[in-house]
Image (spheres, helix red, strand yellow):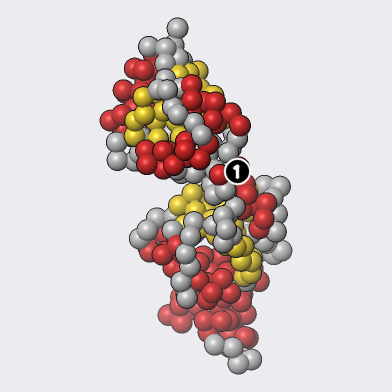
Amino acid sequence: MTGTLVLAGTPIGDIADAPPRLAEELAGADVVAAEDTRRLRRLTQALGVTPKGRVVSYFEGNEAARTPELVEELLGGARVLLVTDAGMPSVSDPGYRLVAAAVEKDIKVTAVPGPSAVLTALALSGLPVDRFCFEGFLPRKAGERLSRLREVSGERRTLVYFEAPHRLDDTLAAMAEVFGTERRAAVCRELTKTYEEVRRGSLGELAEWAAEGVRGEITVVVEGAPEKAEAVDAEEMVRRVRVREEAGERRKEAIAAVAVEVGVPKRVVFDAVVAAKRR
């Protein structure tokens, strides 16, 4: 008989959040595949558990090479436990390749549910939770990041992202540019840890706050796009921008305001204004 692949959720911060079954699985698995074996050691010590099985590393750098080895273990009847540094394996963490390979071989895959940064941030954000999209990490390069954001600029569901603290200011600035400065959002930092913080506000406000530097594990929740009340063509958008400019607004602010009014990315209004100037 083939074995079983167990995906085990681990605490995202507070070790007391570890599910009771996690200790049992760590103690009884034939193989424990861990994203970071040093962090696994700290986790098992905190839980008072000594794994009886073989412990191997399974991270982004060796995931492709190690997956066939673990599949062979599973085909031989082993119970393989997969854990990552925090949260559920395969969700923006190593694990997808192994799950896909196990499914292809008709190997049983089960899970030990655990804490989720995605759901925790969503629940704490104060934004609509009935429908949402998890977008993971955005690309590191500015152009690719903007392109990815534009793809979901009209998405009505609440959006959830992971981000590195040193890129948070650039990401929020890009979101403000594409989604509009007034779009509501929440930055959830160090969830369940000692210095947990949830900062809520508009994307413009949050981008300004993050420019000073932010530390810790970050999850960003962004309000979905507003429903378009009316269809507005390029000529009308240009007219609205001109009206605002004549009233004393700078062009940049006028474009941003009109973009929010008509429910389109700021770039769409900007392009319409530029095209009108060329005519």
Q: Position of residue 28 (x, y in %)?
A: 48, 21
Up the image or down, 59 lies above or below 51; here it is below
Q: Nearer the viewer, residue 136 or 52?
A: 52
Q: To which residue does mark 1 refer? A: 16
Q: Position of residue 265 (x, y in %)?
A: 54, 66
Query: Is residue 75 visible in this depiction of the protein?
Result: yes
The kind of residue on which mark 1 rests is: Ala
- Assess disc 1: are there few (<14), some (14-19) or many (≥20) residues with their C-alpha within 10 Å of its C-alpha: few
Residue drawn at (50%, 71%), measured in percent from left and top?
210
* Occupied quadrant, residue 231: bottom right
Q: Position of residue 88 (x, y in %)?
A: 52, 38
Image position of 103 (left or right of 187): left
Q: Quadrant of the C terminus?
A: bottom left
* Occupied quadrant, residue 94: top left
Q: Nearer the viewer, residue 175 or 76?
A: 76
Residue drawn at (61%, 32%), measured in percent from left and top?
20
Q: Position of residue 89 (x, y in %)?
A: 48, 36
Residue drawn at (49%, 49%), measured in percent from left and top?
136
| SS for callout 1 | helix
Image position of 214 (left or right of 18): left
Query: Is residue 35 visible in this depiction of the protein?
Result: no
Residue drawn at (47%, 76%), measured in percent from left and top?
212
Up the image or down, 187 lies above or below 89; here it is below
Q: Quadrant of the N terminus?
A: top left
